[in-house]
Amino acid sequence: MEKVTIDALESRMGPASVKRALAGPLGTDNIALNYYELAPGESFGFGYHRHPDQEEVFLIRSGTATFETEDGEVRVEAGDAIRFAPGEWQLGRNEGEERVVALALGAPQEMGDTDMLRHCEDCGGRTHNYIEMTDDRDALVTRCEDCDAETGRFT
């Protein structure tokens, strides 16, 4: 048995105000588990993405998240859950005025490669992107795979 206090865990850099990984501290072998808090305008992911080898479930504890999906936008409110099968494109955002608090579960724990699309101003549309840490390690940036332009910066 393992127990953790979520507020005692360090938050990770990224597009959400708070992202705390629970899988490592809980010692899970087969499932990824993350705690999120999204301020208005923030998102769960760095861009519209899919995990070809991992299914993902989001349980919204408070607020309302809006997920961009292949079938259009889906609103997920407090007390609701949404599942994405391996290979399904998605991006959840907080488009409201209230903070979103959620748990994200992924299985298997190792998600493999993630395909991600973001808008690239230089290329004039959505392109495949990758994520890298800045040299001074104070931010993560997304870069266009076509032209290497920076498309986002996250602290």
Image (tube, rainbow, N blue to C red):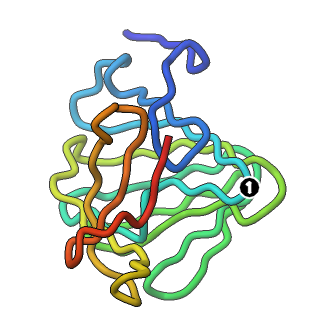
Please, what is the three-letter code of the amino acid marked with disc 1? Pro
> Quick one: label 1, few (<14), some, or many (20+) residues within 10 Å?
some
Would residue 107 appear left or right of 68 to someone viewing this image?
A: left
Q: Is residue 136 above or below residue 54?
A: above
Which quadrant of the figure has residue 57?
A: bottom left
Q: Percent position (x, y) of residue 153?
A: 46, 53
Which quadrant of the figure has residue 73?
A: bottom right
Q: Nearer the viewer, residue 68 or 143?
A: 143
Q: Is residue 55 above or below residue 123?
A: above
What residue sits 35% from the left and 74% below the top?
A: 117
Q: Nearer the viewer, residue 107 or 65?
A: 65
Residue tagged 1: 40
How many numbered marks does the figure carry?
Answer: 1
Element assignment for label 1: loop
Would residue 124 appear left or right of 82 to someone viewing this image?
A: left
Q: Percent position (x, y) of residue 126?
A: 38, 83
What residue sits 56% from the left and 70% below the top?
A: 67
Would residue 90 appear left or right of 95 to someone viewing this image?
A: left
Would residue 84 appear left or right of 154 to someone viewing this image?
A: left
Q: Quadrant of the N terminus?
A: top left
